[in-house]
Image (cartoon, coloured by chain):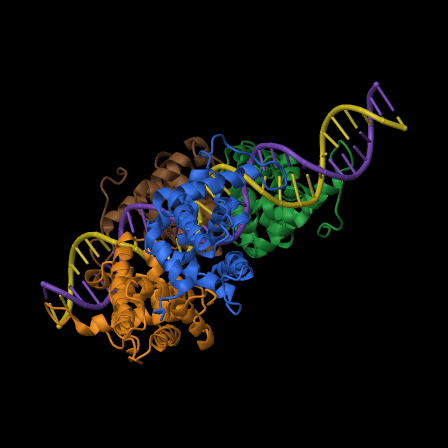
Chain colours: A blue, B orange, C brown, D green, E yellow, F purple
DNA sequence: TGCTAATCGAGACGGTACGTCTAGTCTTTTT
DNA sequence: AAAAAGACTAGACGTACCGTCTCGATTAGCA
């Protein structure tokens, strides 16, 4: 993650100083983790990063834009193709929840969702981002379809939505520690359904 | 809903003035609708309700507590027992989404979730409330189980969670206008599963 | 002058807290004396007074309004009627210059004049105040007129203006230490004129 | 005066570009006239002149230095020798006030005085400049002395100070439109005195 | 003719202050 | 005892300037 700002950074000419950008993103992450979303203010980030507020506002128009960049920096683990949809989806959910739980990305993403509730611009960006992620997840279903595991008329995006929604609410209600059994049950409900088989 | 405060209310002596409480809840709802979550402040509510801030703080310890009461006031429609799980769940989702869409309760609940991200107390209350709602929804699954529609080992709470999560994310990403077809598809995925039937 | 704020002051109900007002005026004076006009900011005053900025802005619409109140608090010595215009005016100038030199009022008034150069409202107030002072000074000339010391058609306000201008420029150019001889000479020029008497 | 910067000026090699200097002085004057002293900032001047801030700081160490050069560029009218002290001084005051009133030099000089109240360096320069002007004005009194109009022991600098002070305060309190009658009265007070002649 | 050195516009940098808004607490007055 | 009212400290908001810095370009004068 990197430490707080060390020495006074200077301008490096009429262009963005990447050191400052890094220091600000580091500070934003640190402030969010240490003080929580309620303690997350541009002032606090500027203080922590030893940066001027205008420097932050110059590059990030809003708190959410900053959060977004912080989130993007925290790269997600790749989900391997297990050759089996259930394991793919269980792996996906386990990875996502533990990534949110074990890195600061959970705090960041929660905050981003919260921020989207008061800022329409953020909301739009979040929706766009979400679509992209669903498309990515949808490929698991498409692979399964290709293998004949899944009915041909299934909407991969909708399934991805259903699965991701499960993750979102667990994030938003502090239930990131769900055990594998429960996750697998939920995934099975979606794959095999809950209806009684005759 | 009620109008803004009309005339200067006076104290009615050594007990809570129900007019004030109503005026405050009305004002809270109005402010939230008109100015959005970002414009929702205790100050703004007090101004709108012609109430003193301490009056609000006396009865509601936090912004979220106020939001909660506003939400509770907006009674939900009852979901009739259709005798069929799919229709029960589709009805449930349709009702919930349209209730959120057509009354101010959507704004209120969104705000509540957002608020929970910065206040642990609120988060706890929200989780508790959610559990209660899931238990309520779970009864649909139990009824279906009693009818033999659903496998005996299905966890009703988990299914309710899955279904409610779908509603939550649609609320949080401004997609309350999902059409019945999509909702029904999502419900079928959960009930019948997406797996290809041999 | 009074010390810095000691303990956190609280509100004393729905009315102005004179302790806060005093603390703010004390702090304003102290900041001006210690940091000079260039270091005189509302922020600095608030910090010094342990007051919130809004408390200052609530009661003083501008930096100048605050300076004005600080100036008014520093009561001027009364100028005794010596029964002789020359001594009256010399006394007036000596008193004024030493008052400006020995109390903080010199710094305050300089700042006020400076502030008036960038704020038309302040300028208007300053002109009004100046008129009042000139009227006051003008009475010395009127008394002398009554005694037959001064020609009947002399404009007392204009004389007061001339005399006060001398004081102003000495204030503005750091020449408050003018000795009595020079002051008396200047006064004599006005009273007896510089023309060679035949 | 010149217009705003026309085309992008470039460096003309390892020496000061007089076009830039001119553009900056023009811009400074224009900004001061249009936005007043409160809107007069180095940023604004640089923007207006299409100059880099460092270019300004390279040649003028402070806002006041810039103002000073602007003021110096605005040449004063010469005061003709009328052969009579009263007319000399009335002419001097009339010229000075109308010069301040009709050109931008009034704004500039006001700002310079204001600036001197927060910057000791400027104050010193201003005092020095003032002395020079007083010496110049003092020559009117010396000429009158030589003609036998004025008593031999009169201090010309002090008289100049008295007369200039009158002009300064009129500048600082927006009274540059004083009519000739009043000016002449003030001058007569100094020359003939206000004392009743027996 | 090619190199060096100073200057130019440009604009980012860490800061400070601006004036406004809200948070949550407090006290007096009125009912 | 509780309501209305509004003041209080505290601190975040987003913006404007401050004075400094580095860049890349430009060009005169020296080599």
Q: Position of residue C5 (x, y in %)?
A: 26, 41
As drawn, D99 above or below D138: below
Q: Considering depth in this image, is C44 or C189 the residue closer to the camera?
A: C44
- Specify the quadrant of the image occupied by residue C93: top left
Q: Where's residue C101, x and y in %?
A: 39, 35
Image position, residue B109 (x, y; %): 34, 66
Identify which residue, C40 or C105, lies in the foreground. C40
The percent coordinates of residue D86 (x first, y second) are 60, 46
Identity of the residue drawn at 46% across and 50% down: A67
Image quarter of residue B149: bottom left
Q: Residue D20 or C52: which is nearer the viewer?
A: C52
- Identified at 61% across, 55% down, the residue is D34
Q: Locate residue C35: give its quadrant.
A: top left
Q: Is residue B174 left or right of residue D68?
A: left
Quarter holding the C terminus of chain A is bottom left
Q: Is residue C180 left or right of residue B121?
A: right
Along the viewing direction, whichever of A31 and B157 lies nearer the viewer:
B157
Can residue D54 be spotted in the picture? yes
- In the rendered image of this protein, does residue D184 appear above or below residue A117? above
């Amino acid at each position: 993650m990197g430490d707080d700002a060390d020495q006074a950074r200077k301008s490096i000419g009429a262009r963005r100083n990447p050191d400052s950008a890094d220091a600000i993103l580091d500070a934003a992450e640190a402030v969010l983790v240490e003080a929580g979303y309620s303690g997350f203010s541009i002032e606090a980030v500027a203080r922590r990063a030893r940066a001027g507020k205008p420097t932050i506002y110059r590059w990030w128009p809003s708190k959410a834009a900053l959060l977004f960049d912080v989130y993007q920096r925290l790269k997600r683990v790749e989900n391997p193709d297990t050759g089996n949809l259930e394991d793919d989806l269980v792996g996906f959910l386990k990875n996502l929840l533990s990534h949110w739980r074990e890195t600061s990305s959970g705090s960041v993403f929660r905050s981003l969702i919260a921020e989207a509730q008061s800022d329409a611009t953020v909301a739009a960006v979040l929706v766009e981002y979400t679509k992209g992620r669903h498309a990515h997840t949808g490929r698991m279903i498409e692979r399964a379809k290709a293998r004949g595991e899944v009915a041909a008329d299934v909407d991969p995006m909708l399934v991805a939505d259903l699965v991701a929604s499960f993750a979102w609410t667990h994030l938003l209600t502090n239930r990131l520690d769900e055990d594998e059994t429960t996750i697998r049950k939920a995934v099975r409900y979606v794959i095999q359904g809950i209806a009684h088989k005759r």
